[in-house]
Each structure stands twice: as C-alpha cells, then as structure tokens.
Image (cartoon, coloured by chain):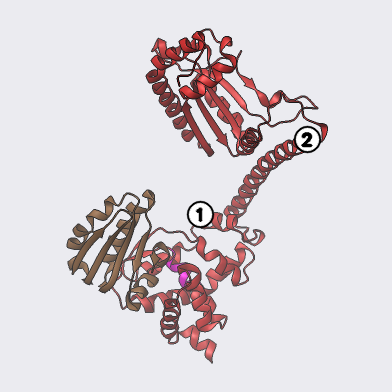
Amino acid sequence: MKTTIQENEKVMVAVLEGRLDTAAAAETGKALAPLYEANGRDIIFDCNALEYISSSGLRLFLGVLKAAKPKGSQVIISGINDELRKVFALTGFTNLFTFQ
Amino acid sequence: MTEQRNPHTELLLEEYRQQLPMLERLEQQAYQLLAAALKKQGIELNSIEHRVKTEKSLAGKLELKGEKYHTINDITDLVGIRIITFYTDDVDKVSVIVKQLFNVDWQNSVDKRKLHQLNSFGYLSLHYICSLRTDDKEMAAVKFEIQMRTALQHVWSAIEHDIGYKGAVKLPPDLRRQFSRLAGMLELADDEFNRLRTTMSEYRRQVQALVKSGHLDEVPLSTDSFRSFLEINPFDRLNQRIASVNQAELFRTSMMLFLPILEDFGMQTLGDIQTFVEQNSEDAYQLALSQLAVTDLDIMADSVALQNLCLVHSLKQGRGIEGLTYIYNTINGRRDSNRTLAAAILKMAESLPFMQEITK
C-alpha cells in the first residue's frame, strides 16, 4: 500500500495505491496525518489505484471526515471502482462523502 | 492640504487618539462578554457587529455637532455593538442579557420602537448606552452603545440610510405614504415571523407528544414529524440485528435524506412508516445479510436498516432496477454508477424468499 500527499493552497490530495486492508491501515493512518491539518482546504482521496478497502480503511476515511467537516473542508472520493463503491453503499457511507 | 478644524474639535480628536488603545480593549471585552452570554442562552442571531469609531467618522460627527460635547467621554458611541436578531421577541431577550451584563445609562438609552407617533413612519431599534462593570476606572468611565434590532429593522435602517432620508426632512405626502406603507409592511412581517415561530414550536411539541404516546397514525409525515420520529430510534432493532452479522460498530448519520423516498412510496403518516418497518424488517435483514455475510465489514452507518427497508419495499412494489436506482440517486446523488449498484443489489435479492414470492 502506497500513500502520497500532494497539496496546494486550496486542496490536499491523498493518492492511495494498492490494498487498504487491516495490515496496511496503521501505516496509511500515519501517512494521512497531514490531512488533519487541512484547515478548511478541501480533501480529495484519489482512489484510481485503490484495489481494496477494509473496515479499517473506512475508519481512516471517517476519521479524516470527522476532523475536516467542522473546519469547512469537503471530503471528496475520486476515481473509486465499482467494487469499492459497493462497500460504501453496503455500509451506508455513500451519503457522507462526495464522490467524483 | 491640511484640513482646518476648530480648536475644540481638535482637542476632542486628540483625546480620542490617546484613548484609542483603551477603546479597542473595551470593544473586545464588551463583545466577548456579550457573545458568550448570548451563546449560553442559545439565542440565534442574524449577526453581531462591533467596532471602534474611526477618527474620520468622529471628525465628521464633531464637525456637525461638536459643541454638544465637552469631553470625549460625552460621546457615547465611540465603541458600538450591533446585535441583529431574527425575531422581535429575541430583541427583548437580548436586552435583558445586556441589562444583566452592563451598567445601562437609562437617561440616554432609547427604545426607539416606542417613539412613533400615529402619523409617523420608520422602523426603529432599541439602543442602550452602557458601561463596563470593571475595576479599571478609566474604562468604566467610557460609555458605549449597544443597538438591538431585528433583521427587518436592519434592512429598513440600511435602505433609509441609502436613500439619504432622515426624519427631519419634510417630504411630500405621497412619499410619506410610501415610506409608511413599507414600514408598516416590515413591522407586520416581523410580527408574523414571530407568530410563525411560536406556532411552529407548538406544532413540534404536539407532534413530539403524539410520537411519544404512540399515536403515529395521527401524525402527518413532514420534515418536522420525521425528525421527531427519528428521536425514538424506530430503526434501532433492525440496525442492531444487521450489525450483529459482523459484530459491527454503528456510526451515527442523518436519515433525513430518506424522507423523499418514503414520500415517493406514498406514505402519509408516521403510522405508515411504522407499518412499513413491521412489514419489511425480516426481508430487509435477509437482504442486508446476503450483502454483508460475505464481507468482514465491521463498521456501518445507522442508516443501513432504513436503506435496506427502502430497497425491499421498492422491490416488493415491483419497481425493479429503476426503483433501486432512484433510491441510490436520492441518497448518494445522481450518478451513472448508481445503476450498476442497483443491478448488483437486484441480483443479490433475486435469490431471497420475498422476491421469489413476487415472481411466482
């Protein structure tokens, strides 16, 4: 699992590549830490190369969402494949995020 | 070119410059005290503005009526706070809080709302001249102004200022009549908004009482009634049952997005929703089970029960893939992938007993 953070004045992008399973969650969580300092900038999870997400991965997304929303950031999930979208739909989480 | 001012004005301006740092401290202290107290009382405001008068603005005022003031402390609006409420009742509540927090100079405070003669016009606010209760004697000696008004009074004041009308100008009767009509309309609108709020609060209380007493058939489905209904956690049992499939944690989320779907199903009362829950719970559980049992997902939103109830109900109504797509479009926002999702759910549902009953 590889996580890269890119940022500019308006947006922070987390590019996720590989399988976000329980084993990878701790390390990915550390890599996502800068997103907690978005301070109102929008956050994009670039999931074009994300192959799998477990509950631990969903919790990471939710953690970022909970920290970002009160500060006015929008959390956008971009490029997610149909299988992963199904995971979000099954768990009822699709309406919490904005999908692109 | 240097502006020539009379010596008295220049003297007052010099006093102002010396006091400016203290005025800025006073402005912050008064504002923070007030903002904290209003927040504590839960009074929702349109806005709260605060400022120290600029030197330019003060110079303008002194040019016009400088002789009225002996010292800088005779000017009571060097620091000003303006509180704009949504409702007229809240102006009175704010005024009580102001009286509790500050010393009010009653001789110079005016309730302009009560100043109108029968044949006058305008739409005015409540002004208190206050001072801070503090051990800092210099600061305690400075008076400041707090204006309290509704949003509509504020609109009136802003437009009046823009038009350039001040009460002293004699206007022709037809213009006076236009002003009076507008002022009357705004005052009436303010009263009506106030009354509407009281009526809405009463309606909410009645709905809550009916929901609590279980008389759900008597409660029409609306945004308010659905919100009250959610407070009794009508989907909790099914949520717990679904969560137990993977010993999942339930994450609280809003279920208001589902209201248009329930309305689209033709539900008219909360009783209809209760019947919908009773009639579809077992099948909704089976549908959720078929989706979740093959995963290790142990976190889900607490809308999962309602979502599955809606999917099942739509399928039972024979709406097929179009009905499922409509549900996903409503809760997720319209996008092409919702149809793919609907197709996957439909395929899963086809093996369940309730679908086989339908297709018999």
Query: In the depicted view, which residue is nearer to us: B111 or A82?
Result: B111
Of all chains, the one bearing label 1 is: B
Per the rendered image, the range of residues in magenta is B303-310
Query: In the depicted view, which residue is nearer to us: B206 or B154?
Result: B154
Q: Is residue B89 magenta?
A: no
Tag 2, which secondary structure? Answer: helix
The secondary structure that most of the magenta stretch takes on is helix
Could you tell me how far apart the alpha carbons at marks 2 and 1 are, in whole angstroms? 53 Å
In this view of the protein, can residue A20 be seen by the observer?
A: no
Instruction: Please tell me the colour of chain B.
Output: red
Can you say whether B5 is above or below B350 in the image? above
| Quarter occupied by residue B340 | bottom left
Q: Amino acid at mark 1?
A: Glu
Residue, x 66% and y 43% (percent of image)?
Answer: B193
Can you say whether B246 is above or below B16 in the image? below
Indicate which disc residue B175 carries. 2
Q: Does label 2 or label 1 sit earlier along the sequence?
A: 2
Residue, x 34% and y 71% (percent of image)?
Answer: B245
| Residue B308 percent coordinates (x, y) | 46, 72
| Residue B18 percent coordinates (x, y) | 39, 14
Tag 1, which secondary structure? Answer: helix
Q: Amino acid at mark 2?
A: Leu
Instruction: Please tell me the colour of chain A.
Output: brown
